[in-house]
Amino acid sequence: SMDLLNDVRPKDFTHPLMVVVLGASGDLAKKKTYPALFGLYCRELLPQDTLIYGYARSHIELSEFRKKIGSYLKGDENKKKAFLDLCFYHSGAYDKKEAYDEFNKILVDAESKMVKGSNNRLFYMAIPPSIFIDVAKGIKGSLISSSGWSRVIVEKPFGRDLASSRELISELKKLFPEKDLFRIDHYLGKEMVQNLMVLRFANAVFEPLWSKSHISSISITFKEDIGTEGRGGYFDQFGIIRDVMQNHLLQVLSLVAMEPPVSMSAEDITNEKVKLLRSIQPLRLDELVLGQFVGSKDGKYPGYLDDEGVPKDSKTATFASQVFHVNNPRWRGIPFILKCGKALDQRKTEIRIQFKGPDNFLFSDVDRNELVMRIQPGEAVYLKLLSKKPGLNNTIEQTELDLSYRSRFENLDLPDAYERLILDSIRGDHNLFVRDDELDVAWQIFTPLLEQIESLKVIPEKYEFGTRGPASADELAQKMGYVRSKQYSWPGQSKF
Amino acid sequence: SMDLLNDVRPKDFTHPLMVVVLGASGDLAKKKTYPALFGLYCRELLPQDTLIYGYARSHIELSEFRKKIGSYLKGDENKKKAFLDLCFYHSGAYDKKEAYDEFNKILVDAESKMVKGSNNRLFYMAIPPSIFIDVAKGIKGSLISSSGWSRVIVEKPFGRDLASSRELISELKKLFPEKDLFRIDHYLGKEMVQNLMVLRFANAVFEPLWSKSHISSISITFKEDIGTEGRGGYFDQFGIIRDVMQNHLLQVLSLVAMEPPVSMSAEDITNEKVKLLRSIQPLRLDELVLGQFVGSKDGKYPGYLDDEGVPKDSKTATFASQVFHVNNPRWRGIPFILKCGKALDQRKTEIRIQFKGPDNFLFSDVDRNELVMRIQPGEAVYLKLLSKKPGLNNTIEQTELDLSYRSRFENLDLPDAYERLILDSIRGDHNLFVRDDELDVAWQIFTPLLEQIESLKVIPEKYEFGTRGPASADELAQKMGYVRSKQYSWPGQSKF
Amino acid sequence: SMDLLNDVRPKDFTHPLMVVVLGASGDLAKKKTYPALFGLYCRELLPQDTLIYGYARSHIELSEFRKKIGSYLKGDENKKKAFLDLCFYHSGAYDKKEAYDEFNKILVDAESKMVKGSNNRLFYMAIPPSIFIDVAKGIKGSLISSSGWSRVIVEKPFGRDLASSRELISELKKLFPEKDLFRIDHYLGKEMVQNLMVLRFANAVFEPLWSKSHISSISITFKEDIGTEGRGGYFDQFGIIRDVMQNHLLQVLSLVAMEPPVSMSAEDITNEKVKLLRSIQPLRLDELVLGQFVGSKDGKYPGYLDDEGVPKDSKTATFASQVFHVNNPRWRGIPFILKCGKALDQRKTEIRIQFKGPDNFLFSDVDRNELVMRIQPGEAVYLKLLSKKPGLNNTIEQTELDLSYRSRFENLDLPDAYERLILDSIRGDHNLFVRDDELDVAWQIFTPLLEQIESLKVIPEKYEFGTRGPASADELAQKMGYVRSKQYSWPGQSKF
Amino acid sequence: SMDLLNDVRPKDFTHPLMVVVLGASGDLAKKKTYPALFGLYCRELLPQDTLIYGYARSHIELSEFRKKIGSYLKGDENKKKAFLDLCFYHSGAYDKKEAYDEFNKILVDAESKMVKGSNNRLFYMAIPPSIFIDVAKGIKGSLISSSGWSRVIVEKPFGRDLASSRELISELKKLFPEKDLFRIDHYLGKEMVQNLMVLRFANAVFEPLWSKSHISSISITFKEDIGTEGRGGYFDQFGIIRDVMQNHLLQVLSLVAMEPPVSMSAEDITNEKVKLLRSIQPLRLDELVLGQFVGSKDGKYPGYLDDEGVPKDSKTATFASQVFHVNNPRWRGIPFILKCGKALDQRKTEIRIQFKGPDNFLFSDVDRNELVMRIQPGEAVYLKLLSKKPGLNNTIEQTELDLSYRSRFENLDLPDAYERLILDSIRGDHNLFVRDDELDVAWQIFTPLLEQIESLKVIPEKYEFGTRGPASADELAQKMGYVRSKQYSWPGQSKF
């Protein structure tokens, strides 16, 4: 309804907006940035007069650029065409002030033909980390809007470790105030991740259960069923811990585990996330399992080392499972088991809260309650529950209280995480972005572990493409008290 | 499977069983006792050699008796026929020893042709309270098995008040030991009522929420959408409180609210139920709403006073809502709102646990969580939950975690409550029957209230057939802190 | 004040009372029964017209009897004399009806000279278990009052095991209704034991702490600093477990650990005690330490085997420490460490509730909070607490919140446990006595352990007279998670 | 011991320290600053080579200055003399750079004769708020140490409201980094206030009780038994809310109520205090009682308006009681009753935590448990407890678990709050000082209330000198659920 749109639309809706995509010819831009902008366009959530300028080194003809971009857009053809008409491209160097000055002239010229109002500019840095600072300086030196706001969206990786991250942060800080920086962790834009705050804090039934008194372990699992698929060369510089665990999974952990904030403002929520992260004990190598996938037995799927660009002696992990301990009254003694991997048996991301057995002694050896929040695919929340099997016998059966989005909500149209995040940056809402001190403490947590792995040359365990990953990971979870239920599979699973 | 049957079957399966239905020509026998016996017969849960003898005053031909009984049985015609072949009938006086002696000869004679073994006898007293004691004496004096057990199933009403109930109990006690008496409250045989123990005590997630700290109120509601339908004359002697609240609803209350027992034995569970009932504060007239239905405006449905046999000036309540307070640490200050009525807007029985609002101040004025256990029809458990409405907006929506039996369990075949109870009496399991001290304390709770109603000649509020009942009942619930959610209706409802 | 006396005095104060002490010439009678009766006499709490008749086999002159009795009384000489004037003695057989009949005549004769009223009779059985039943039959057959109540006080041992206890119970049950039997466990008469109910249930601050969530272990310790002192022959038939642990310490345990009762009535409290005892897991031999004392090194104090009457190869334990586990939601996983012994380093009985460390991580390795209830000597309650040491440094120090009776209450005059118990039996108050099913379940708990000890011929560990007992006991406690604080001693200790 | 001293001593102990007392001729300097410095001197906690320079406008001879200072010092005469030898005085303008430059020369000259090392300078601003900024600029412009640290101690009042406080903060921020500013609230230096952290977080028994579930109300009370005593003119500009409640009592409140911090660092503790303060609901005028004292009936003690310098129509409150509500999960619904006043019946400051009644129904209408932390005088912690009155009756009595410093700790030598605070500033420890954002939120809380009081011209209730204050204050407390116990007075009270 109109009301709803008004509610969601940026309040700058009537002002002209110039979106500048730096690194417009790259993969991220094509696959994520432009499709998300198109999504917002279709929902009529971009400001009424918006132009999108791509910028990159390579010379590309506009028509060809539009074709390339267009090939990733899905939806109505007319809308696609209309959207592409708003997209332009300019090539230039990343490290020359003159190049940016020239680009600015083009922007100013274009803006002069747009509606009158504050000329807001949104810079989306879809570029490799090596040129972050150059580009940031270019923006600061030449591209800042003279009449509206200028905001910068930054993509991970935000450094390789604490030192490099701090350097990046401090360099950016010199150029832009924190309020104009939007560090994306696209997991924060996922529907279920956002729902986490509502589930935890709008429902009175969860908070009393949300502690060591009742919870036995919390698993946060990210599984991909594909390998590196030709991007192994790039991946090999980072490995799965930096690529997934240090950012996405740690973000999810901090939202699952943090204390209730004073308010729902970005500032207050991030304060709590930082407080939580600061309570994490040093990570221990003996609570870590690393894995690297090999080709499937049937030869169908290649191993990691088979990927072109991956050094043949690479020790880079494509799978990691690490136990986290949070030193605060709520979580004392409860393991958080974070697990992520490529080339596994299925694709899913989920939070699995396993409860302790009941306190009484009336039912022995029954399966445990679990609250599962499924982030992707197939957003769902379900609570595994024991129930009397209907009938004259007195058997107990594992069943569940279920809320699957697709069966509950009709005509479900879930926006992509990037759509939400770009929209929020236009609206100036920092809620779903990563604050500088948050990033800093995340690196404080991981850097000593990463250094140990490197200095001790820890060799990852091999696992076959398409399996559950290294057996040691299941053993680690079991050692931490996690109990897999024997014969249960969630009925909702079949739908995906 | 065979295993399952073995598990459920009485261990006396190979011994002969004589079921004696006293009052065999009455309504209860036809509508409940025989159909339940037939159900057990079809499931092959009656002992292999079972005969069923009806006994009553009226002279009826066996063929006619079987026809009458048969008209209430549902299922396979061959099985029906085979079952009726096991049914016999004998007429005799209720108050003459000779009559019972004669009947016993017939039984002994029949038993002599059955398989060898202990000759067990199950007496089902489907008779009005006025002849209880006579019949019990008859059984005791003439019909006790000489080689097996003799058990007596008794139906409510167990008296009209504390004095009459105590008399009944003490008279029966002189005749039979407690272990051979089975007082039926058929609500205890309902699937969801039995599941209550499993839900509460096999699931670690419920117990921590199950107290005044988190619960705001508990409503136990019984609604019928029919009136007295010609049985008003009989009903008028008792009224809705004696007919439904004092037994069925109080049983449900005690199971919902009791402390965890030492074991799942009948003895231990009843100990806890009695302890709970003893903690109930005296009922207060100002926390009671009484109602009596009048005909529907469209004239389609008659009022209570229109029912033949109901005195025109009857003050008997067909609707009652009473608040209960339990004086123990778990429930201090939490109202239990029991409500039952005839001629209302729908038919359902359910337990509704409404939780308090969340403890934090992040979400204001949101609907409250509720855990609903639906006893009939459409057995279900669901937890009303707030969730972020999927999409770019940040709206919160009432939704639910749902477990509906019919959608979760395939080929669901729920036995009738009477089936289970008769089976349990054959198995000697007292779990689902009412113990003498339990009955006593139930009458201790209600008798002062009933006496007040009568001595003060409280006039019930009129309500129209087919409505929610007296408006005062909703006001009472609201005064007790119950908050109806504004625009929610359970999607599962539509299925019934 | 008069008011207070009225409150405490038996309501039968104006009726004549005949106290009959069976076994009047024995140790118990002299040391406990008569001094307690004298105490009540001095407090003016015995009915106004009371006579005390001793009965035993031996012929003793009244004057000599009075002298013997008198030698154990302490207090005002005039009162002593007046009291002894109320004491008479009659010798007779324990196993002959005629003897009792004759004795009854004497009693009736004496009663005829007392004030008019119901002639109440209180029988105190200060006799060995071997003649319990004979004497009980004698009372029942000849001595029952024809116009008032007749109550029987029974002293432990109530059997040696489950079988013998059940026999005793069932024999007594044939003779007296439960309401007229008063089984004494004199620990229930101790001031601090009675205070336990008040402390636990009148103070809102204890109940929230009283569970596995906050408590780490509960120790109940009974220490004597004397040996068997010539009574070893008798002791050797029972051993310390039967003598102290199975009754006194188990009573204390059940009061410490039970759930809140429905009311403070004896019936309801005992129901909870029985429920608690029924939740105790089978005792394990590997959680038991047995000890037997040897003479002190300096030769001053003899060993157990040195005691005359003790068989030289006796394996009887004079020290025992056993861990109890209570299978209920409140206590799951928390050890109750019961310890009792003779010939140890000090004399004291206390309950020591050790709490877990704080949930936060702000103070590491600090001593733990303990709540200590000291039963004897020097009744006190204190809570060991950490506090900042006053001054400019930031040291933390173990200190305590203290309530010592002697320093808090002026002119403290604590009645002996026996005084209270005899008074309660006159008042008909069963609160502090042991019910038959309670006794039964106590023996159910201990009998398998005692049988194992005997069949496996477990050899007790030797320990020196005057020490802390076997080292294994401290190790057992430590294994159970009990942490002794390093350098703390309770300042209150010095006063005793 | 030496060890202890080493622990407490500043690590800069061997470096020269110049203490500069600005406003050295004023009351605060004489009564608090110099005596505290003398205390540290006597304890050998000032750096070995320390000089103390007073600075003020008035010309005073050194000998006279020393005499004046000396008259407020207590202790050994030799030490006094030695200490005064370290004290110097220089007069100069507060608002002239040249004056400060000249003063600096003197300091540099003096420092040149001290031991070699970093020349640390501690500036103690014992001056009225009107010249704060001038003096701060003077320090910054001329007096900063060239080789060591320069720290500034600031005394309240920090403004009169949010606007003036923000101006002060921002002006000071321009001159000094937060790490060099030490805002004193001397209540934070009190022994019991510091002990609060230890009591709450080192003892496992308090945290579980520390919430709305168990606490009924928390009162923080400051009572003086003297009036304004000639200082009424100054006091009248501020009133009791600004003088005591907005700083001292709010500090105590935030320490009592805050969540456990991540660590015991000043930063983390202050984060929690700020979070707590931000959760305080707007103060309500209808939950405020204001009072102004009048002379005692016997004429002995004058009223506030009798004080010279107080305007005859002054509406300034000398007594205030305000209820605070903290909007977080821990404290939802629990009132914090802050009360402060002059000319009352006694002198004391205490925190009184009143618990709810017990959850069970076994003891009705008993007095409530209270945990009292007495800040001054007579530091003590005691827990009001119900206990069985020793003896044969079953009366319950209010008693207490007690920890009174003076009876527990021998030779107790409690340093003054100022001593600790000055020592901490020398040690660079911010723990006990007020951070800028903390001050800001304190003013956010109080400013709207103060503005309402002023704009509505609220007239304070009169109360007699030497009484409990306005009766309305007791009524307000009662309305908030506080229950005064009937006949109890703490035995410890008598000792002060």
Image: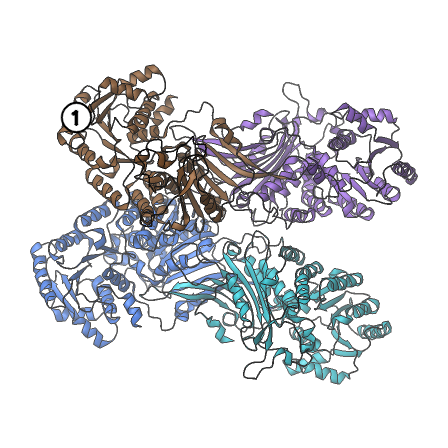
Chain colours: A cyan, B blue, C brown, D purple
Q: Which image quarter: residue D185?
A: top right
Res B11 → quadrant:
bottom left
Q: Nearer the viewer, residue B317 or C394?
A: C394
As displayed, is residue A261 above or below residue D296?
Answer: below
Q: Where residue D343 appears, x then y in whole percent?
A: 65, 27
Q: Nearer the viewer, residue A415 or A283?
A: A283
Q: Residue B72: x and y, percent?
A: 23, 69
| Amino acid marked by disc 1 | Phe
Q: List the residue tagged with mark 1.
A: C103
- Identify which residue, B335 or D315, lies in the foreground: B335
Give SS at disc 1: helix
* Location of residue C450 with respect to D114 vertically, above or below: below
In the image, what residue occupies the spot 15% across and 54% down? Answer: B135
Q: Position of residue C417 (x, y in %)?
A: 36, 30
Please, which chain is the residue tagged with disc 1 on? Answer: C
Q: Position of residue B81 (x, y in %)?
A: 19, 74
Which residue is rendered at x = 47% and y = 56% of the image?
Answer: B484
Left or right position of A361 against D495? left
Picture quarter with the N terminus of chain C = top left
In the shown orientation, is residue D110 left or right of residue D324?
right
Residue A247 visible from this viewpoint = yes
Identify which residue, A318 or C282, lies in the foreground: C282
Residue B388 visible in this rendered orientation of the protein: no
Compared across the picture, whether A381 is left or right of C173 comes to right
How many callouts does the rendering have?
1
**Mark 1: few/some/many CA within 10 Å (<14, 14-19, 20+):** some
Q: Is residue A55 above or below residue D141?
A: below
A343 relative to B63 in the view: left or right: right
